[in-house]
Image (spheres, rainbow, N blue to C red):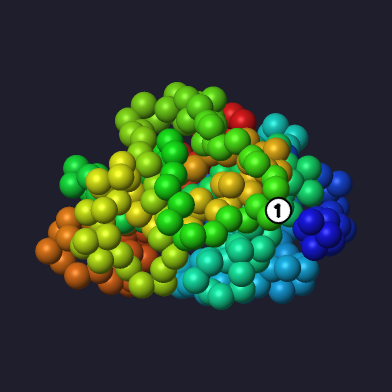
Amino acid sequence: MEVARAAAAVIAERTGADHHDVALVLGTGWKEAGTLLGETLAEIDNTDVPGFHGAALSGHTSSMRSVAIGDTGKRALVYGTRSHYYEGRGVRSVVQGVRTAAAAGCSAIVLTNGCGGLNPEWAPGTPVLISDHINLTATSPIEGANFVDLTDLYSPRLRQLAREVDGSLEEGVYVQFRGPHYETPAEVRMAMAIGGDLVGMSTSLEAIAARQSGLEVLGISLVTNPAAGISATPLNHEEVVEAGKAASARCGALLAQVVGRL
């Protein structure tokens, strides 16, 4: 937490804001949301902030922004990338953005990602609310005898608010694997058997840390491809990025409207 407090102090100094109200983590396909949310009041390179690193994936940006949320007088702290567990920096690095958001005064965080879909009816470009998750990373961001309740981790209130913005939104259970390799067809079948609807390599660890930090969590996945075995087409990261770009306008508008009502 000391690193998070140090990061929050740098953010406050560089943005001129003593606190931010909500944080957003922009995953694959969600880049447009930061632009549509409101005016960018300040931008900081990740490497200038303690505990943060540059983007490891194409389609992500190596900076964070302080954005005015419409004319509400509130500010959003928008992360253009995240640290993934498979990058090898440890779980503390993965949740640094979340803990920094809490130290910066945020009361809520929106976690987005690009993922594989297990429902054949969810075509690439479909946004899906995360109702729950299954963490298959074999780790936790919580250390010691600190027993955090994860019931309703993904806020029912915020999910309802999102559905008021877009009544077509469906919900699903997100399954986080360690990565960086994609899941095998057998692993996808396992995920389906244990109740999963979406598979990916992020989000769950961040959500757990957010609950521990007292943040209200909204999770939204963008289905960028059918998971392995669902479609006969081999998985390809470039196609995932392209699917995200194709859906960016819709996803950006959705997220901007939701955050504007938080």
Q: Is residue 32 left or right of residue 8?
A: left
Residues 214 and 165: in front is: 214
Counting labels gives 1
Q: Secondary structure at mark 1?
A: loop
Name the residue at 21% across, 62% down: 185
Task: Report the front residue among 26 and 257.
Answer: 26
Residue 157, given in percent of the width and then of the height, sits at: 54, 25
The answer, for residue 18, to whether it is visible in the render is yes
57 lies above or below 163: below
Image quadrant holding the C terminus, namely top right
- Horizontally, is 207 left or right of 252 in the view? right
Which amino acid type is shown beneath numbered disc 1?
Gly
For the N terminus, the image quarter is bottom right
Residue indicated by mark 1: 144
Q: Residue at x 69, y 68 (%)?
A: 52
Q: Nearer the viewer, residue 41 or 28?
A: 28
96 with respect to 186 (left or right):
right
Residue at the (70%, 48%) spot, across then down: 145
Relative to 31, is 73 on the left or the right? right
Q: Quadrant of residue 93?
A: bottom right
